[in-house]
Image: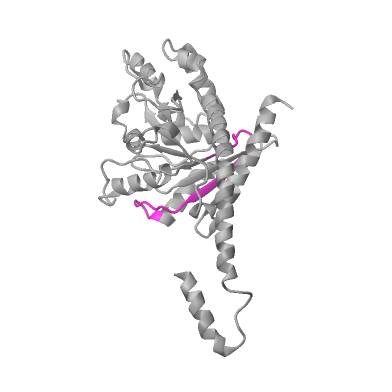
Amino acid sequence: MSLSEKYEKKVRPYLDLIDSLRLLGVEKDLALPAIVVIGDQSSGKSSVLEALSGVALPRGSGNVTRCPLELKMKKSRQEDFWHGKIKYRDTERVITDPADVERSIRKAQNELAGALGMSEELISLEVTSTKAPDLTFIDLPGIVHVPIDGQPEDIGEQIKSLIKKFITKQDTIILVVAPCNVDISTTEALRMAQESNLTERTLGILTKPDLVDRGKENEVLSVINNKIIYLTKGYMVVRCRGQQEIMDRTPFDEAIQKEKDFFIEHPHFRMPYKEGKATIPKLVKRLTHELVLHIEKSVPQLKEQIQRVLAEIQTELDRYNSEPPTDPEQWRDFLTDVSRTQK
């Protein structure tokens, strides 16, 4: 068994445990370990998730992510295998063609949030593929600064409120996606992590290094080297498919090779590559390592929380005795007791 196969064998059981608990609705009462992806609108967030998952996600002008999207990726050992499944509300559908993923997500968002609104209801997309890594993400809507026609005036505040609900959970790793060609200090998503004192759980992902103006490269390197806004987990940089490559339907495998060539050949950005801080494959390796460490650390506390909740439920059940009384004279006392425990 290769080193990567041994690592996958260790990773998958942890992720299956967390996914099964989330499916059972345990997250309503307990905080489950997760990787949450946030960023300002047009930060390149969708491009990063596309590159990680190998499937096309909704794109376009405006805010294309309008509901929390749980993206569960599972690696298959079958050659050339791909299978998808989408779940939301009371709907569950199988997706047999990767090309149908984007349309399925848009349909789900329209049903949950209307044409332009936002919803806090979760959409779950599961992708099992030969090329997928064993990772689970929760993608949140990009932060909007100016609402478009038809959107609520407070759409930006709605999104920030939703983001805060997710990132303030102690068992969450936060990925803040920001483009290289803007001032990192103006990134609202990063500012939210700072204001909530969450920088120790935050990893910065820089996108669009190919759009950096000549002469600005050293400023970007300073960000990557954690010298501008310090994050305990630091920063990584990736180059995903550009608009022309998307229009040309450049395959993800080819885009990954182009990304590698870009960093190797770039006079400034070759150094982050050599240090393991650049490209999607190295990001996958880093995220897998971070998530496993995070879950391992969380499991003992999670076990205690589950045992405490079970004990509380058992105590409540014991109050009902064994079954409702058969004597009509005892019904009033029984119903009063039931009513009291429900309050």
Relative depth, front residue between 165 and 133? 165
Q: Is residue 123 magenta?
A: yes
Residue occupying image coordinates x 58% and y 73% = 320
Residue occupying image coordinates x 40% and y 47% = 165
Q: Is residue 77 magenta?
A: no
Q: Position of residue 284 (x, y in %)?
A: 54, 29
Rendered view: 219 above or below 334: above
Rendered view: 272 above or below 132: above
Q: Is residue 93 visible?
A: no
Q: Position of residue 4 (x, y in %)?
A: 66, 27
Relative depth, front residue between 18 and 88? 18
Q: Left or right of 255: which side holds 229?
A: left
Q: Residue furthest right?
A: 1
Q: Position of residue 324 (x, y in %)?
A: 60, 80
Residue occupying image coordinates x 42% and y 29% = 204
Quarter of the image that includes the C terminus? bottom left
Relative depth, front residue between 325 and 251? 325
Q: Quadrant of residue 62?
A: top left
Way the structure is coloured:
one colour
Q: Which residues lie in the magenta part?
A: 113-136
